[in-house]
């Protein structure tokens, strides 16, 4: 998909999401222009128009709510940061559960059917 085609589809999605806005093409143009400062068109076009419509709404809502310019790149960075924290928590919890399973099996002197599949890797930073 080309960026112009994506833009048209985002505008259509915006009309479906928030019909009270009317013509949202200027909002979409501003959001895409900001995104293009940090991302290549090929990356931008990998996201569905529905996702860009929501990103456009968030991009403008936070500017209106705070008066501060939050870039699309900063929005993406925050989402990725949050996702990494959640995934790390899931990984650590699974590692803890497998460790406990291993301890219980050793206490019972029963052979463990499988060794824990995950191991904790500490990042040296």
Image (spheres, rainbow, N blue to C red):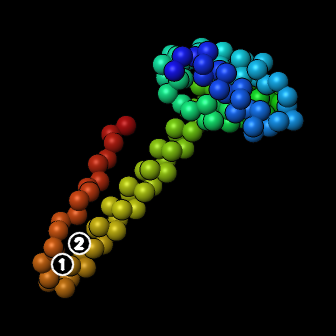
Residue 92 is situated, as x and y percent measured from the top left of the image, at: 38, 57
CA distance for labels 2 and 1: 6 Å
Res. 121 visible in picture: yes
Q: Which residue is mark 2?
A: 102
Q: Horizontally, is 73 left or right of 26 in the view?
A: left
Q: Is residue 115 above or below residue 22?
A: below
Q: Which mark is residue 64?
A: none
67 and 13: which is toward the camera = 13
Neighbour tally class for label 1: few under 14, some 14-19, many 20 plus, Cα within 10 Å: few
Disc 2 crowd, CA 10 A, few/some/many (<14, 14-19, 20+):
some
State the residue at coordinates (82%, 24%).
23
Q: Position of residue 41 (x, y in %)?
A: 52, 16
**Depicted 34 relative to depicted 63: above or below:** above
Q: Do labels 2 and 1 touch, CB within 8 Å?
A: yes
Secondary structure at numbered mark 2:
helix
From this view, report whether residue 90 is shown above or below residue 107.
Answer: above
The residue depicted at 70 percent of the width and 33 percent of the height is 13
Residue at 87% from the left image edge and 35% from the top image edge = 20
Question: Does dot 1 land on a helix, a strand or a loop?
Answer: helix
Residue 6 spot, x, y in % from top left:
60, 22
Of residues 47 and 31, the one nearer the viewer is 47
Question: What residue does disc 1 label?
Answer: 106
- Rendering coords of residue 50 (x, y %): 63, 36
């Amino acid at each position: 998909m080309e960026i112009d085609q994506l833009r048209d589809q985002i505008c259509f999605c915006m009309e479906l999401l928030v019909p009270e806005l009317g013509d949202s093409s200027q909002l979409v143009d501003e959001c895409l222009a900001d995104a293009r400062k940090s991302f290549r068109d090929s990356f931008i076009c990998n996201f569905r128009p529905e996702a860009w419509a929501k990103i456009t709404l968030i991009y403008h809502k936070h500017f209106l709510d705070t008066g501060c310019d939050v870039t699309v790149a900063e929005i993406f960075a925050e989402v990725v940061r949050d996702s990494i924290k959640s995934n790390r928590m899931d990984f650590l919890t699974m590692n803890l559960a497998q460790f406990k399973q291993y301890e219980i099996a050793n206490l019972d002197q029963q052979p463990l059917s499988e060794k824990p599949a995950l191991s904790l890797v500490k990042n040296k930073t």
